[in-house]
DNA sequence: CGCCCTTTTGAGGCATTTCAAACATTGTGG
DNA sequence: CCACAATGTTTGAAATGCCTCAAAAGGGCG
């Protein structure tokens, strides 16, 4: 429907032509040939430094964000001041989705390293989407993917031992890198031990001990934030020893 | 846009006219006067018994479901066989969303008590939505609301003590009942101790002890699955003592 | 070089799990 | 309608994984 109307909404795909991650991003809903060349309105942020916030819990919804390079941590905090990291995001990931329900961000997003993002005014996004239904579909898929990820996170926190959580985390990172064409077995973590600990809901000291243990057992090689996985099989093994609390469905 | 087209998609709103929860459901995206009277195609299931599944993890996506009466548990399970309850659903809630990403359900849904649901063929839903953009918006809002809920669940599992989890759970149930016009302080739980335990990721025995403790301390009155909250203030208090693992954002 | 923050390592403590057993409730078939 | 089995709940006592506290070691950066 009305492909020729897309031209009136240049912001969405303005700079997608030269983006190597457009295949992984909601922009794939727009056929390349329909993407106008005019790169005017899509706000592509200059690099954010580690610690810079894309948005904070409580901020009004203005834009959604897509990671272009670098990585981002999403976290929420309580009235009590305690906080929980709910996701790590990498290039192609859509952020800020949870603000749609109440026009207000329900989580905070902060750059873990030097990071670039595309900022998409939400009003623009819905305007384009009503012209290109495929974009609605893509947005729904993105939301559904995030739901699945959060369910896995709940299973991780609810059913796995500290060691299994840690192994699962490493495999998660490994897979994300592999999906982007990077090495599955060697990478630099963009998050600190503290940040890993919070995401996995264990103490920092536990993470430190696990790094040491797995290195001693020949599963990993670690140097500060650099990790080399020596045995993916061993990691997979470790990732699967559960605790099985209150299981019940026949 | 094209309100007169809606008539060609009767299924969605077929029986919404006489549904007391339509205000809480995605159907609210459709103006009452635009809802056709012809109640033909919307599959409204006859009552499901406790234990009956709406769908299982791995099933092909055919429909989304809206709870009409009763309640539903959503859970996922591992390769290892351990399982994690990820949500409890009540009238008006949309289920099956996580199947959209890969055309396959990524969680299972099972009735907790005698339950009726509206079954909406997904193809129909998207067809109607492309005619009525407000429906897309409503679907997105629903997805975003579920994302927020799952983030809260992660914070619950990651940062709270068993007691705080339990208090938070009771307040959650209390609020859901209140939102539906039922008593905030007296209700019958539709889930077993085992199911509560799994959702909160603690041992069944811990739940049992917590019920006993809170009753002894005069916060609750409990008789099997019937609960009377004697002090909402005390519960709120209990819900907020955290553990604060690895907090770090300045 | 010296300060600060992150990471590591050790020892002890505690919340929660596990294990075990009694008890209550529900469902079933005679 | 009752015995009986199966399942769900409660309670106690012991075990343990992980946290907390403390302190040293290692890098990064002005």
Image: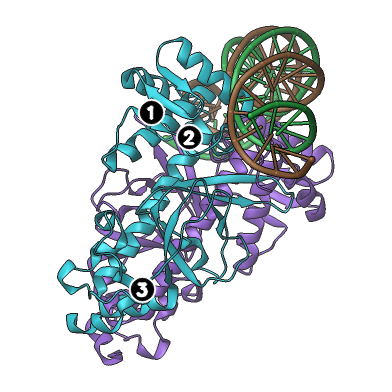
Chain colours: A purple, B cyan, C brown, D green
**Residues marked 3 and 1 touching at CB (< 8 Å):** no
Q: Are marks 2 and 1 on the same chain?
A: no
Q: Residue under label 1, please give it.
A: A81
Residue A136 marker: 3
- Residue B86 appears at what percent x and percent y? 53, 46
Residue B156 marker: 2
Q: Earlier in the sequence, mark 3 or mark 1?
A: 1
Q: Secondary structure at mark 2?
A: helix
**Residues marked 2 and 1 touching at CB (< 8 Å):** no
Mark 1: give few (<14), some (14-19) or many (20+) Cα within 10 Å. few
Q: Disc count in the image? A: 3
Q: Secondary structure at mark 3?
A: helix
**Residues marked 2 and 3 touching at CB (< 8 Å):** no
The residue shown at (44%, 73%) is B122
The residue shown at (26%, 51%) is A102
Q: Is residue B221 visible?
A: yes
- Residue B75 appears at what percent x and percent y? 57, 50
Alpha-carbon span between mark 2 and mark 1: 13 Å
Chain ID, mark 1: A
């Amino acid at each position: 429907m009305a492909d020729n109307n897309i031209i009136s909404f240049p912001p969405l795909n303005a700079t997608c032509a030269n983006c190597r991650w457009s295949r992984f991003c909601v922009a794939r809903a727009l056929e390349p040939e329909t993407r106008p060349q005019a790169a005017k309105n899509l706000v592509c942020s200059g690099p954010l430094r580690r610690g810079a916030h894309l948005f904070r819990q409580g901020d009004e919804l203005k834009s959604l964000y897509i990671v272009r390079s670098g990585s981002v941590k999403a976290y929420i905090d309580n009235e009590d001041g305690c906080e929980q990291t709910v996701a790590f995001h990498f290039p192609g990931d859509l952020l800020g989705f949870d603000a749609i329900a109440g026009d207000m961000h329900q989580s905070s997003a902060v750059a873990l390293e030097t990071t670039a993002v595309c900022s998409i005014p939400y009003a623009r996004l819905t305007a384009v989407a009503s012209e290109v239904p495929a974009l609605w579909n893509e947005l729904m898929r993105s939301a559904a993917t995030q739901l699945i990820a959060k369910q896995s996170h709940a299973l991780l926190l609810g059913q796995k031992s500290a060691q299994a959580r840690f192994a699962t985390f490493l495999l998660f990172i490994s897979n994300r890198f592999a999906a982007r064409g990077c090495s599955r077995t060697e990478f630099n973590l963009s998050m600190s031990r503290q940040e890993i600990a919070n995401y996995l809901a264990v103490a920092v000291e536990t993470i430190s001990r696990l790094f040491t243990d797995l290195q001693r057992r020949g599963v990993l090689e670690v140097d500060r934030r650099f990790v080399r996985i020596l045995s993916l099989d061993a990691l997979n093994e470790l990732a699967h020893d559960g605790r099985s609390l209150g299981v019940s469905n026949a």
